[in-house]
Image: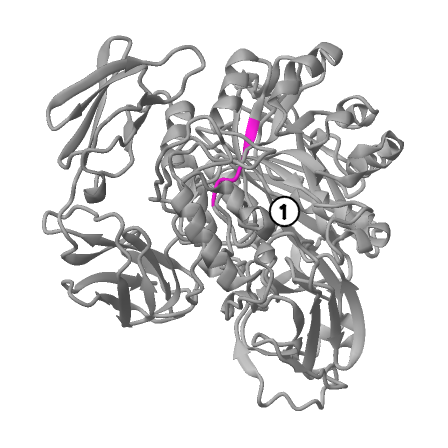
Amino acid sequence: MKKYLLSILCFVSFITYAQRETTSFNENWKFARFGEMPDGSTKAEPKDIDEVAYDDAHWRILNLPHDWGIEGPFRADLPNQTGKLPWAGIGWYRKVFTATESDLSKKVFIEFDGAMSNTSVFVNGSYVGEWAYGYSSFRFEISRYLKQGNNTIAVRLNNKAASSRWYPGGGIYRNVRLVKTNPTHIAHWGTFVITPNVSNKEATVEITTEVVGDKKDVQVMHEIYTTGKNAVKVAEQKIPYYQPSNITISNPKLWDLENPNLYTLKTTLTKNGKILDVYNTTFGIRSIEYNANGFFLNGKKVRMNGVCQHHDLGPLGTAVNVRAMERQIEILKSFGVNAIRTSHNPPAPEFLEMCDKMGVLVQVEAFDVWGKKKVDNDYASLFGAWHEKDLITMVKRDRNHPSVVMWSTGNELIELREGNDAPLAAKLADIIRSVDTTRPTTFGNSRPEAATNGFQFTADVFGFNYKPHMYEEFRKENPNMPLYGSETASTISSRGEYFFPVNFDDKKQGNGGFFQVSSYDYSAPNWADIPEKDFEAEDKFPWLFGQFVWTGFDYIGEPTPYNKDKTNLLNFSDPKEKARMKAELAKMGKQIPPRSSYFGIVDLCGFPKDRYYLYQSKWKPELPMAHILPHWNWPERVGKVTPVLVYTSGDEAELFLNGKSLGRKKKGQYEYRLIWKDVVYQKGELKVVAYKNGKKWATEKVKTTGTANKVSLTADRTKIKADGQDLSFITVEIKDKKGQTVPRTHNVVNYTISGPGEIVAVGNGDTTSHESFQATTRKVFNGMALVVVKSKKGQTGKITVTATSKGLKTTKVNLTVEE
């Protein structure tokens, strides 16, 4: 995991010598693109870009992390599977930095948390090394290429088209560091902390340390501290570097979902009284166990309420931002998520740090493919040469995170069809076990035959993708194998869109509007289903240790069901809608507009869809809540049947329309929503009163609103840091005179900003919109949009964001930027 250099305490018995120095290497890079350009043209790649003398004066200056694809523009001719954005192409980054005389006697490394993709690094015109996989973290030693004074580093990326099934982004999209150490130092990711014996009274902490360089007479001092403002040392031990450390901690603060307590291990490397290196490792004290009865954290049975997450940050693209990741996790936790699968690749290290701090379990996944390809230029072309390096890198980097509880070797592999390929799965699991035996291995299995063809014996815990009907039979044949849903549901919907008539029984129906999907939550691809199927399986089978829903957030790319032109018309139940869409498709040919997914429980901006409340009702049963759908603005439906659904953590509810009861309904066994199918629309107020165990539990109202009157701005945080990275996410809503959000509105809103900040992204959750994410104008989608503001480094003061829209009252929101 990522290590931070904390302040070092120098004891009188030690002489400080050549300590580790870690500095951010993100600022003041020069950047240019070649090959396929954003506008579809082609630009020749010049020679000698890696040379010091190359003239880059005309290049763009920027800071990392950087995603060149999200800058756009959207292009109708690009594949919607990968978001219709120009992420493919060649990119070069160059930077001049200084090396001092003393630096030349040190070991100097350049560390990349991730670069998309096929990265080659040059220093002062010399080739240093390459790393192909865009999701791996890696580093190169550059000591021998340095000279005193100015040095030039050049980084080439080659993002090949047809190399991904979703939007991968492009560029050096994660953080970069420069690390300087003494020649004898602790290796990259060189500490491994495990806690083999854990109780509330006592815990054993075992530490192994890998040292590089002259190891004669080298000793290590391990000191363990609590974290936070008032850190306290709880243990220490001094031993020879090669000896594993075994430390007992009394009354440990355990890491769990409710109290994610963390510790800092400070490892000091010494020789003859001199400090050679200091290395800090964050870890947690916890135990995990999987058995036939489920998953146990610190001896307590926990069911994983999980979601799958791709790595993009919505309108911000793939460029890593800690606050954006933190907000995603906050939103996921708010409807009951306690586990995340990093589909289908290793995440940014900061993401795992957030999960450590926020108490979320993580399955870290390695690959989307092994040796057999899904798209022409995907990881299959790299697998033979790179899979072992990438797996070891993944596990070494992430094995100290208490949040990480599973390693996945891959997702829906083509190899799963043939039992002859099962030894490959076993080999990959063995590679992982060579560097970590404390967590189980798994893979996402979408093939029924893989449950019986030998693959079932190659995983420590077995996961089915979209096969709840197979759980019981698999359990009979494999009674001791821990089992879970590795990918579930894949229900599809568009926030705030509802189409009629509602088809309650055909999951292929429910599409309408302009390439939208009904939020009545009955639509799913043919290989998927509605959430209830997996809820029922969990309630029937208490030994099932959880599920990972596809997906928590919408993501850029894969706009199922509109990713196959020939089948689009099959999704429409209303003949008029089908005829209208047939005409639209005739105009567009194959260049249909959808560019992001419909799978999310929340949309691309983080705004909840109706399904958010269905999952919340199941995953947070102790929370009094009720949710009504649809909205109640249907002037064209007066006198027509307009079904009403209620999602509630209660067990029964009574629905009222304009004060008149429409009946009280109770959930039956394996029923998770309450339905009033025959409600006849009339404007006014819908009200639900939910009950639990016969007592009033929660109430909710939905009213017919007035017309749009004003724009409303609400910031998730009104105080942000002046670090040039902190963000405020501002929700934009169209309100009536009474302050109610008006659904079915699509007003264009213009944004201006003053003060020490900038608008870095806008969005609205509409999967069909080709408006730029990097703009100061955006339509709302069904009443809502998002503006993301970032601070300017080193500048404090007041930021004012103003929103204007034709015919509506203007509004402002103020933010404060602090040190």
Residue in the image at 54% along x and 43% along y: 309
Q: Is residue 331 left or right of residue 121?
A: left
Position of residue 737 measured from the top left corner of the image (x, y, whole percent): 10, 51
Q: Is residue 424 magenta?
A: no
In this picture, which residue range is highlighted in magenta? 547-553
- Is 548 magenta? The answer is yes
The 10 Å Cα crowd at callout 1, few under 14, some 14 to 19, many 20 or more, is many
**Residue 60 visible, this orientation:** yes
Q: On the picture, is 742 further left or further right than 107? A: left
Q: How is the image coloured?
A: one colour
The residue that appears at 79% across and 51% down in the rendered structure is 380
Residue 512 drawn at (x, y percent) = 41, 46
* Point 27% across, 52% down: residue: 783
Secondary structure category for the residue under label 1? loop
Residue 22 percent coordinates (x, y) = 61, 62
Q: Which residue is labeled 1 in the image?
A: 1
Looking at the rendering, in which quadrant would you find the C terminus? bottom left
Instruction: Compare residues 495 and 95 and report the one nearer the observer.
Output: 495
In percent of width and height, residue 195 lies at: 65, 28
